[in-house]
Amino acid sequence: MSKGLSLWFAVSSIVLLTACAIMISTNWLIAIGLGILSILNIGWGFIIKSKRKPS
């Protein structure tokens, strides 16, 4: 995976998890949704990494 794509997944995961942490104190439904979305984002990054790995 290229450095730019790795940086994108790292930053987007941090932003999603930070938003989830902020939402825990205000709205727990949005916090659960953001938590699920961040897990899916991290998983998607691993999937792309494994598909782009040179054989």
Image: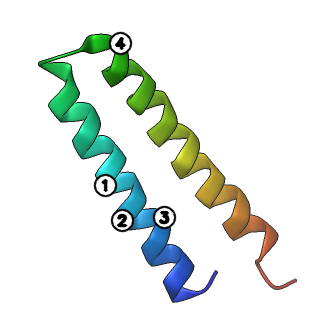
Q: Which residue is mark 2?
A: 11
Give me the C-alpha separation between circle 3 and circle 4: 24 Å
Frontmost of labels 4 and 2 is 4
The image position of residue 2, as x and y in percent, is 60, 86
- Check the image and report above or below for 13 versus 53: above
Residue found 31% across the figure and 55% down from its top:
14
Q: Are marks 2 and 3 in contact (CB under 8 Å)?
A: yes
Q: Are marks 2 and 1 in contact (CB under 8 Å)?
A: yes
Q: Which residue is mark 4?
A: 29
Checking the image for residue 49, the label placed there is none
- Check the image and report above or below for 38 versus 7: above
Nearer to the camera, 25 or 53: 25
Give me the C-alpha separation between circle 4 and circle 1: 19 Å
Q: Amino acid at mark 2?
A: Val
Frontmost of labels 3 and 4 is 4
Q: Which residue is mark 1?
A: 14
Give me the C-alpha separation between circle 2 and circle 1: 5 Å
The image position of residue 44, as x and y in percent, is 64, 52
Give me the C-alpha separation between circle 4 and circle 2: 23 Å
Residue found 20% across the figure and 33% down from its top:
21
- Please report whichever mark, 4 or 1, sits nearer to the chain's N-terminal start: 1
Q: Which residue is mark 3?
A: 9
The image position of residue 24, as x and y in percent, is 19, 21
